[in-house]
Amino acid sequence: MDRDSLVAAVARQGATVRELKKNGGAAADITAAVVALNELKAQLSAMAEPAGPVLNKKALEDLLLRKMFVVPSFEIYGGVGGFYDFGPPGAALKGNLLAAWRRHFLMEDDVLEIECTNIMPEVVLKTSGHVDRFTDLMAKCTKSGECYRADKLVEDFIENLLAKNASALSSAEQEKHRLVATKAESLTPEEMHAVIQEYGILSPGHGAPLSFPMPFNLMFKCHIGPEGTHVGYLRPETAQGIFLNFRRLLEYNAGKIPFGCAQIGNAFRNEIAPRNGLVRVREFQQAEIEWFVHPEDKAHAKFGLVADQILNLFPKELQLTTGKTVQMTVRDAVAKKIIANESLAYYLARTSTFVKAIGIDMERVRFRQHLDTEMAHYACDCWDLEIQLSSGWVECAGHADRSCYDLQVHAAKSKVEMVGTLKYDAPRAKDIVDIKVNKGKVGKAFKADMAHINKGLQALATDDAAAMAFEATLASAGRADLVVDGKSFALERDMWSAKKVTKTFLEEKFVPSVIEPSFGVGRLLTAVFEHTFYAREGDEKRGVMAFPASIAPIKVAVLPLSTAKEFTPVMLALERDLRARGIACKSDASSVAIGRKYARVDELGVPFGVTIDFETAGDQCVTVRERDSCAQLRVPLAKVVALLDDLVAGRVAWADLAKVYTVVEAKKDE
Amino acid sequence: MDRDSLVAAVARQGATVRELKKNGGAAADITAAVVALNELKAQLSAMAEPAGPVLNKKALEDLLLRKMFVVPSFEIYGGVGGFYDFGPPGAALKGNLLAAWRRHFLMEDDVLEIECTNIMPEVVLKTSGHVDRFTDLMAKCTKSGECYRADKLVEDFIENLLAKNASALSSAEQEKHRLVATKAESLTPEEMHAVIQEYGILSPGHGAPLSFPMPFNLMFKCHIGPEGTHVGYLRPETAQGIFLNFRRLLEYNAGKIPFGCAQIGNAFRNEIAPRNGLVRVREFQQAEIEWFVHPEDKAHAKFGLVADQILNLFPKELQLTTGKTVQMTVRDAVAKKIIANESLAYYLARTSTFVKAIGIDMERVRFRQHLDTEMAHYACDCWDLEIQLSSGWVECAGHADRSCYDLQVHAAKSKVEMVGTLKYDAPRAKDIVDIKVNKGKVGKAFKADMAHINKGLQALATDDAAAMAFEATLASAGRADLVVDGKSFALERDMWSAKKVTKTFLEEKFVPSVIEPSFGVGRLLTAVFEHTFYAREGDEKRGVMAFPASIAPIKVAVLPLSTAKEFTPVMLALERDLRARGIACKSDASSVAIGRKYARVDELGVPFGVTIDFETAGDQCVTVRERDSCAQLRVPLAKVVALLDDLVAGRVAWADLAKVYTVVEAKKDE
């Protein structure tokens, strides 16, 4: 559904609700209509707002391909959907972006970094929930065997139905259909099948009946070892490797919590329908941090450093009401419980600073909270960094409070304890329920049923209220029934007892919660491309990539004015000295005009150009050009490399240099 | 076979050869015996020599695991053979090693770098030859279904047979068996089956018969997309992605050849029997360069810079004769045609410099040329960088001249031309065979057989000698038979003609050859671990990793002498200033003795330690300690960060500082 249809749908559904209320409709009907209204509103507010600067998308895509930033993989064989390669400038830009990410997030907070394998055995992803739940519903054409995402088929069918029958259908009927489309993504296979049958939806390709919709797991499966029996998967996220290593990481960190661990690496998702360039691909790179904290103390030591920062927030309440974002300080957002805790808020703030530094237009950035219905199976609160791109608002990073889900399930399955220890400053007295079991008597009485008995006693041991209730029954009746898996076992008074006691503790064990900022590297790059690309004023054909110098793939272009032999030694010396400082440079000694050379390096986003001209031999100076202003300064050869180093590192600003060196007037075509 | 058995086998086979010659054996028998002798000698010389410094491997392995350099993946689930994770210091070491690799190889020679996908569609790897040839023979136990590498079964069986029947078998019989074992790796399935039958080899696990041995492809297979019909593989090497992108890369490089393109990334091999830590794993990282050159001009512009360098070479001739390496300059090696060309030799020299810089002991390094029988299907000359480790000489990098194999097969399959253009300085006259085809007449005469005819004419067009012979027949007999796939077609004189003419050319097209230095990152790391690990003199339990500062995961340890509160601000200020310069540091503010703190950071290979003590508040100085000498200097706080920066970057040497700053006597336990 496009934005305009949605706006209309919200209006109509609002009218339906009002009508129902006015006419005294049944409470259940009113509730259902309100729920439908809220869902439509949420859909609408999550949509791209019309606006943002106009992007010449075709020109950008042409540049990205032609300059080999990003190219389709296996292109000479026609490519395969959802796979892209990074060419030289793309790979360098990505490398620089990741280096900036490491400096910003890891070095700053002493976050550890590890590197785990891409292939994982089934047990890991079964335990994490991905084998069972990382699925989309797929329906097959019974004639051709072609596969479709079932929810997309339903949405498309209903959109088409409404478009063709706009006048024939009543407003209420239209809403009913629309609601089905809205809910398609969350249907069970049975519900989906019923919808397909009800509407008589056929396969788009052959008009043949569709198979019963089945969950299609998005993970790539393979087999480890020669037997073919050991199933493995390519990881769908890098996070799991960190959880598996938690115990060793905690030890490496000398037992201290909070601490963070990061991983940068590939993740793989066998999308049924990859699309939209780097936004929905089958192989991509993630940069994830798992920040482990005490579940009841998610304060962050450096919160004060970010508390005054203002964020553009889109909390779930506003998505369901006004549909507008709100700007507030990080401090207020936490104080008002809009963001759940300091650690989560700290990372939202740090992410905001980071995306600004890599060249993202902050007018097109928001942090959107997940609605309760869209949260992943492991998360308890989640905020997406969304960046407005030509295709709408796109999630480029997630910030999830995964609670202690992952550590808990892996600990339970592997039988390896994964806990932190909080040592108290002073001993603490705590009321606990002290349970005593007479193992001899219990064993004698229930020899054959000990598995059940142990399970039942274990349940009592972890539930104080249940234990005290059981104790009360034993105390009053002299026996009590332990019910396990439908079976009942009568325990006698002398087999088991519980009482409340006060004990002193020096420390406690806890399963840490984890706050996870997770970045999609390809999506961030897409945002950088779209937000930094512009056409040179007055010449729409001259594209410029305005990368910040910190992440630009090439920092300096060395450009002899012509092919005159005398320029070569100067060019080679500049190259040598720049490289000695680790500054990536590129020379263009070809015979084309200097204006054309500038245009070439503008497309690569090179922030500074050095031109060697016929005066250089005399005045021992070169011209330095700044990419975006095209301003040029005359700088002594002896100083230019150190100066460029300072410029690239951001130690000096271009504007300040103009006060020191002579400004050169650029000629017409430069 | 171990080294001693091999030495004995060589002696015995030598005797056999001498006996045959003495007794006037048949020429074929003598040749076969000599071939067998040479193979045994080659095996022997490729083996680890007894020697090299003694390594306390257990202590090293314990340190690597305990300090989380390298840990088994999925350890809490018991691990899976051939998969390892890099913990914080391991990942940092690897990252620094790769950064050094990029500076040394890529920045130095303007080599492009790209990043391709891990998953590749079948057509790519079918064309490259990997689907058909990247295999080991596997035999299954017919009872349990367990799989074995067939060559290893044969080798083990024969070794066992010889050990048990040493006295019962004649020398000649023993040699016969040994030869079977030696050749096991290169047998066809049918030959392998025959050997298994002949010896009656059964499955080791169940003593059951073995299946017919089948080639087992070492690539991990998966399915792309939901249909399950589109086969993909995880790449077994990163090189293919570069070949696929050749055309765009050449364009990016403005059409100039020679040029290089590199890729660092994962490769996957489903080993039947992974072993030996990071040496034979199922998922690993490669750093590869493809250096494209004109096939008839493999000179290197920078050859002069490396020509005087001395390499420890092990050419194939010496492997088959003396078994000893030879030291010679790169210049001589090329002049004597021991190394095939300048480009290959240039990279051997650069690799040599590189491994020295990352801490490898050059006494345990050699470059071994592949024997003709062991070359990969794509290579025409190959030199392995071998490093002597505790498990013997291990290949850590390969330097292959892959000729134009890959570009040719991909161009043929994809129908995309992959050629370079050599523009001549001056027009060149060349004799060529000019062919004229009368298409009308040919078409009329062979309407139904045009596919055959075209194939035959195409063959003539690419073979000057054949074309001129055909022309001669036509000229003399007036007709000539074109034979295609066993069919014969009589062409008349007026249908086809050829003549030698001299034409002038301004340029030529050529399929580039490619020189490939390819590094196994995990193997290089293993070598760094083994060659830098030592025990502190006088205390065998105190391990030290003597990483060069350039690749050390942590450069500086900040160590307050005790937990005294006054040390904290100094420690935090040092951390802040070190990080501002991008210097990785680690503090230890725990209550353990300073000697213990030093021991901890020695295990992590931290080259420099800064100790804050009770005198710091007074003299505003700290003590700087060098890891390997344990020497300590008193340095002003105001200067220490800049000094450490210089030390880490290698701009100043420790020895020179001792002349400037006061030497501090270390206490007993430091």
Image (cartoon, coloured by chain):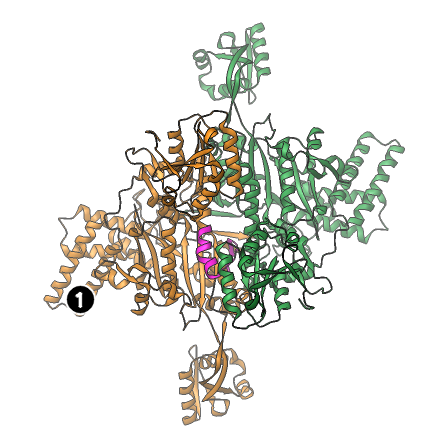
Chain colours: A orange, B green
Q: Is residue B618 above or below residue A360?
A: below
Q: Is residue B549 left or right of residue A355?
A: right
Instruction: From the image, tell me which residue sits under label 1.
Output: A30
Q: Tell me where residue B586 appears, x and y as whole percent.
A: 54, 62
Identify the amino acid type marked 1.
Answer: Ile
- Residue A120: say if magenta: yes
Q: Is residue A208 left or right of residue B618?
A: left
Q: Is residue A148 above or below residue B39?
A: below
User: B310 or B255: nearer the eye?
Assistant: B310
Q: Tell me where residue A637 appears, x and y as whole percent.
A: 48, 36
Q: Is residue B369 above or below residue B213?
A: above
Residue pushed farthest right?
A: B22
Residue shown at the point (70%, 28%) measured from the top left: B335
Residue shown at the point (69%, 65%) measured from the top left: B541
Tell me how many marks there are: 1
The answer to whether residue A217 is seen in the rendering is: no
Residue range in magenta is A99-122
Residue shown at the point (47%, 58%) measured from the top left: A106
Q: Please, what secondary structure does the residue beneath circle 1 have?
A: helix
- Residue B77: say if magenta: no
User: B640 or B471: nearer the eye?
Assistant: B640
The chain containing the residue under callout 1 comes to A
Q: Is residue B432 left or right of residue A158?
A: right
Which quadrant of the figure contains the C terminus of chain A? top left
Q: Tell me where residue B215 appears, x and y as whole percent.
A: 61, 44
